[in-house]
Every structure is written in structure tokens, then in C-alpha cells.
Image (tube, rainbow, N blue to C red):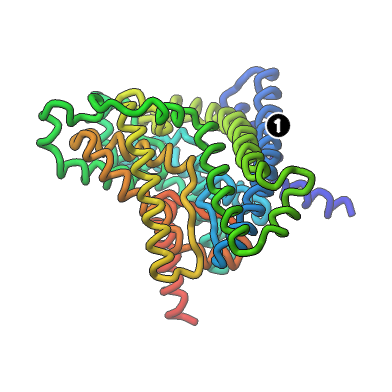
Amino acid sequence: MIIDALLGQVRNTALIIGLVALIGLILQKKKRSEIISGTVKTIVGFMIFNIGSGAMSGVVNNFSALFNAGFGIEGVTTQVEVATALALNEFGTEVALVFVLGFVFNLLIAKFTRFKAIFLTGQHFLYFGAVLALVFIALGAPMWVTVIAGGFFLGLAGAALPSLAQPYMRKITGSDDIAMGHFNLIGYTFAGWLGKIFKGSTEKAGSDSADVKLPEFLKLFRDFVFSVAVFMAVLFYVATIACVVNGQLPLVQEMSGNDIWFIWPLLQGLQFAAGMSVLIYGVRQFIAEITTAFVGISEKYIPNAKPAVDCPAVFPFAPNAVLIGFVGSLLGGFFGMWLMVIFKSPVILIPAAGICFFSGGTSGVFGNAYGGWRGALLGSFVIGIGLVVLPLMLYPAFANLGIADASFPNIDYNVIGAVIYRVIDFIKGLFI
């Protein structure tokens, strides 16, 4: 009985994450008070993350039921936070250990190879760790293989992928001091390359993103929580109206409970944004402590390392390009949805406001680097298509594991994850 209880705690993801912070702080020889505080804040942060993810998952389930009933098709949001929460609920230990080992491999690879990036955007390490863990679990790998192989590929991606986008980072920031630490690096590099199509046009007056006068209402979408709330409310109203048109009003009334049914979609959008706010706060808290532990180690043992930071670091260099990229990515996402409907995809992936703002906005900055507003728009539009279409490559395998209500949208997750999955699956086929 006691052993079973202990094993249950070993599979408690919050305690695993807290243990990692504890070890990192001890290795740095922090004061006892700092060790205790950092460990507790890490565990509490992860618990806050779970509270937010639970609230968001409930809203996503409601939306999926409405969307399916209203349109007669299976709709799934490309919401990485929800997909990660689902993965943690099902395979928390595997994801947590891949995440932790990924940091270790990142430091080792940066220490002994020419890839010197230290990936400091911990939440994206967690998201990519979830993807890689699911890939190996879907392939039927034993736990130890999942953890070691997943951690290795995660650490390699964190150290090596930032080098792809570094030429554009130098152009954007005017220095070589930082790298991009956001796992859409294949996408950002491609967006920057597309921007070069318009390289000569930035010399024309009024063609650069910095000179474009954007409508005032678009500036409201710089607020992430606002953009998520509005976008989810709109999606709920679309699904609700479709249900009403198709005679499914009783379903809407049943789901809305004591709320007025035509106000309920707005409340669901606001609840989703509230859940995401809680989730992001929790992620930032436990990631900050984990990152602090590993940054201290990297500074001491890897002096030539280059910090890879989160994508908002480039937003001040081209704020209009961020908004153009957000709109372009959103349009690309809806175009990708239309393609899925036309080609009768068994599942329809729906673009999420958060991913369109952060990944789409950053794609706009990269496209703008050489191509001005035209490069920002084209680069973000193409990346927006990829954010909803590319997850189809891994969605069937993940759905078989029970991760079916949301998907992982970023380009790196799907390109690298699909390559690993297809290669190993092919090799398995040769021996089975």
C-alpha cells in the first residue's frame, strides 16, 4: 500500500517539476531560503497551470460539441496550451521527464558542439516535450526510450534550431547578442525568406510596415487576453448560430444551463480567456524557477552560450509588422480551414487567436525584415496556413492516444515530430 502510494507520487508531475528546481538550485549553492522558496513556487506554479488548463479544457469541450452539431463535421482548435494540458493529464510523467532531460541535453549540446543556443522559453520546451513524448508513445516505445530519445531530440532542437533564424535576428535587432527561442523557427526562417521576394520594395515611400497606418481598433488586439476572448466568443457565436439554423437550439439551451443561451457564447469566450490567463501565469511562475536553475548552470559552465528568448523580444523592432502578421496569419488559418473543407478532411483544425498573434506576429516581423509590409503579410499568411494544415500529419496518431480535442500547431512541432515518427515507423516496418 505504501509503495503504491509512493509510486503514485512519483507520477505526480508537479512534484517532478519541483524536484528539478530543487536540484538545480542546490547545484548553484543557493541559500537555503532561496532553495525552499524556488521549489515551492515551482510546484504551486504548476498547480496553477493545472487549474487554468482545466477551465480551458471545459470550454474547448463545449465548443467541440457545438461545432460538430452545427456543421456536422469534427472541429478541433489549434490551441497548444490545451493540447499540452491533455498530454499532461494522460502521460504526465513521460512529458515531465522529457521536458527535464531536454534541458540537460540542451546544456550538454551547447557545451560540446557548435550549437550554442540555450533555450530559455521554458513553456515552449514543455509544449515540444509533450509532442515528442506523444510521438514515441504512439510508436509503442518503452518509457525509458521515450524519455531519453525525446529528451535528446528536444535538447538538440533547443540548441540547434535557433541558428536557422539567426541571420534574420541579426537583421531585425541589429546585433548578434540574442537568438530566437520560440519553436516556430522553421516557420520564421521561411517567412523571412519569403520577405526577400519584396526586398527592393522597402525603399519606396510608405511601403515599410513602420510607415503603415493601421486602424485604431486593430491596436486593441495587442492585448493578448482581449484578442483571445474576442476570438473565442466569435467562434462560439458562429457555432451557436450554426446549431440554431440546423435545429439544434435545444442542445445550445441545455449546454448554457442557467445562462441566457444567446449570451452564453460570450461568457464562454471570456471564461476561456480567464482560464488561459491563469494557465499562463502558472506556466510563467514554474518556468521562471526552472529557467533560473538552468541559467545559472549554463552561465557558469558554458560561457559562450547564446540565450534564445521568447518571440515578444522582437515585437518592439516592428510593432506594425506584428499586427499585420497577426491578421495575415489569421487569414491564412481560415484559408487552411477552407482547404480542409474542400478536400473533405476528416477533421477540421481551427486557428487559435493566441498562436496567430504570437507566431503570426513574429512571422510578420521576420517577413518585414527584408520585405516591408508586403513581406510581413505574405510570410504570416503562408505560416498561418501551415499552423492549421501541418498538424494533420500527427493528429491521427495523437488522437489514438486520447489527445483529440486540441492540436499542436507550431511548425517545428509538426515538421520535426512527423519526420521522427515517419522514419522510426518505417524502420519498425522493416523488422516487423
Q: What residue lies at 71% left-to-right and 28% top-to-bottom?
A: 40
Q: Nearer the viewer, residue 1 or 401?
A: 401
Q: Nearer the viewer, residue 17 or 297?
A: 17
Residue 42 percent location from the top left of the image: 65, 31
Task: Check disc 1 and report its element: helix, strand or loop.
Answer: helix
Q: Nearer the viewer, residue 156 or 274?
A: 274
Looking at this rendering, what residue extends furthest in the right direction?
Answer: 1
Total number of numbered discs in the rendering: 1
Residue 139 percent location from the top left of the image: 53, 68
Residue 145 figure quarter = bottom right
Q: Which residue is mark 1?
A: 44
- At label 1, which amino acid type do we have? Val
With respect to residue 215, does 73 lie above or below? below
Residue 104 percent location from the top left of the image: 50, 41
Q: What residue lies at 62% left-to-right and 58% top-to-bottom?
A: 244
Structural crowding at the residue carrying mark 1, measured as other residues with C-alpha within 10 Å and reported as few (<14), some (14–19) or many (≥20): some
Q: What residue lies at 47% left-to-right and 44% top-to-bottom?
A: 105
Where is the N terminus found, in terms of image quarters?
bottom right
Q: Is residue 139 visible?
A: yes
With respect to residue 198, does 213 lie above or below? above
Q: Is residue 310 left or right of residue 10?
A: left
Q: Is residue 143 visible?
A: no
Q: What residue lies at 45% left-to-right and 25% top-to-bottom?
A: 300
Residue 175 percent location from the top left of the image: 25, 24
Q: Is residue 194 left or right of residue 155?
A: left
With respect to residue 137, does 239 lie above or below? above
